Image (cartoon, rainbow, N blue to C red):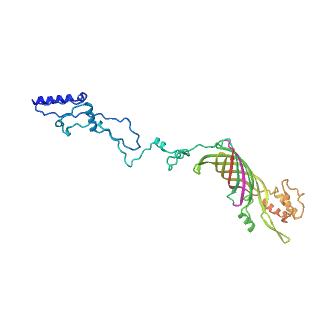
């Protein structure tokens, strides 16, 4: 009798369940004659409900959890329409089958407090203001504490352009026996981007022996050899200029200036002179006159130069130049004002006899008039300078002088 009742309870349980669930459940072996009422199988859990669309959320927020297991199970029972069993027939909670893993959606793991936040570029672009997106040196500054610099191409090409440069000040920096201060004018044609042809002219409006050499003359009646103290009066040369590298730098935050390292070299001729007599005081009939220094022309000499420096360009047409050049010129004093040693000896003999210099048979280039006559302002007799000129050419010497000068100026390009 007990076996028949157990079989009837099993049939009623199976009849009330969902056919699909019955097929998916594992087969339970039939109970024996002495077995008790079998435990009721737990109803299947409803499949996980997927959200159609999640509302937009800020970066770093967690995904809300899905529907809990009890709610899903109640929904499954309501959908299948199964009859509720008596409370006495329900198995204990420990015997109920665990819900499948798919019953609830796993919650998204919350990031650690110290984990770095990944920036959303699209969101940041939508939230930044136009001022923050302004390009500064080619890069948008979303963060004012970050400045990005990029390499830009050379803005202005030099190939095929003309350039005139004026150097108002050319100052000698290695004056041991000589001092020079002058000005220079330079024309440059940029044949290529890094190679140019140039012509340079220079005039030294101040050229004199150094204070050290003048002090020797005044105190001990000695001076440096004529070749070592030869003065450069003017120079003209042609040469080349190369630009091995260039770059740019920023000033006033948003302005760029372009600079170039330049190397130059040239050759030509220069006019030279030498000091014959320094400034002296001439006393005539109880009256004192200041006689300026007397220089003698020593003729043109070969002139060469090597140099280097920087050209800083502002905009398309203007630039500043800072260069150092070494002017190299040969120095041999064998003539003063065109007169050689033989000419000075003839003039000295005529001076002693108070004779005229016109019929002495001097060389064609000798400017004897510079050694004849009396200055009406200072009452200085120029014939007294003949012996000084003869001493300069009596012992001719040769040397190669280096005039290292610093040039600063500006140029115009077109």
Would you say residue 100 is visible in this rendering?
Answer: no
Quadrant holding the N terminus: top left
Residue 190 covered by magenta stretch: yes
Q: Main secondary structure of the magenta part?
A: strand
Q: Position of residue 310 (x, y in %)?
A: 64, 50
User: As drawn, is 213 to the left or to the right of 120?
Assistant: right
Residue toward you, 324 or 68: 68
**327 up-or-down from 54: above or below:** below
Residue toward you, 142 or 43: 43
Q: Which residue appears at 39% of the width and 47% of the height?
A: 115
Q: Position of residue 210 (x, y in %)?
A: 71, 62
Q: Which residues are magenta?
A: 176-191
The quadrant holding residue 392 is: bottom right
Residue toward you, 410 or 399: 410
The quadrant holding residue 178 is: bottom right
Residue 10 covered by magenta stretch: no
């Amino acid at each position: 009798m007990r076996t028949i009742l157990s079989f009837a309870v099993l049939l009623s349980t199976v009849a009330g369940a969902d056919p699909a669930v019955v097929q998916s459940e594992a087969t339970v072996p039939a109970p024996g004659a002495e077995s008790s009422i079998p435990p009721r199988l737990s109803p299947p859990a409803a499949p996980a409900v997927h959200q159609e669309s999640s509302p937009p959320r800020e970066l770093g927020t967690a995904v809300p959890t899905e529907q809990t297991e009890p709610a899903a199970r109640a929904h499954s029972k309501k959908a299948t329409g199964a009859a509720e069993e008596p409370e006495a027939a329900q198995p204990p909670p420990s015997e109920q089958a665990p819900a499948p893993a798919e019953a609830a959606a796993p919650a998204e793991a919350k990031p650690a407090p110290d984990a770095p936040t990944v920036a959303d570029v699209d969101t940041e672009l939508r939230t930044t203001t136009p001022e923050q997106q302004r390009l500064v040196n080619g890069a948008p500054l979303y963060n004012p504490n970050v400045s990005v610099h990029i390499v830009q191409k050379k803005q202005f090409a030099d190939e095929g352009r003309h350039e005139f440069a004026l150097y108002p000040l050319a100052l000698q920096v290695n004056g041991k026996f000589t001092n020079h201060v002058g000005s220079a004018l330079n024309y440059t044609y940029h044949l290529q981007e890094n190679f140019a042809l140039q012509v340079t002219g220079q005039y030294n409006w101040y050229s004199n022996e150094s204070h050290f050499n003048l002090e020797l003359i005044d105190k001990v009646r000695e001076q440096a050899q004529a070749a070592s103290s030869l003065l450069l009066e003017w120079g003209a040369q042609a040469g080349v200029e190369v630009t091995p590298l260039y770059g740019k730098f920023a000033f006033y935050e948003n302005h760029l200036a372009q600079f170039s390292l330049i190397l130059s070299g040239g050759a030509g001729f220069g006019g030279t002179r030498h000091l014959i007599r320094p400034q002296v005081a001439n006393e005539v009939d109880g009256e004192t006159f200041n006689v300026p220094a007397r220089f003698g022309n020593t003729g043109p000499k070969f002139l060469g130069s090597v140099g280097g420096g920087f050209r800083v360009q502002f905009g398309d047409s203007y630039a500043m130049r800072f260069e150092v050049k070494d002017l190299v010129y040969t120095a041999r004093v064998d003539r003063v004002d065109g007169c050689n040693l033989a000419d000075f000896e003839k003039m000295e003999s005529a001076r002693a006899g108070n004779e005229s210099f016109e019929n002495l048979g001097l060389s064609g280039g000798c400017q004897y008039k510079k050694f004849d006559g009396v200055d009406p302002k200072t009452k200085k007799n120029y014939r007294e300078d003949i012996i000084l000129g003869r001493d300069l050419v009596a012992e001719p010497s040769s040397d190669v002088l280096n005039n290292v000068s610093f040039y600063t100026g500006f140029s115009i390009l077109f």
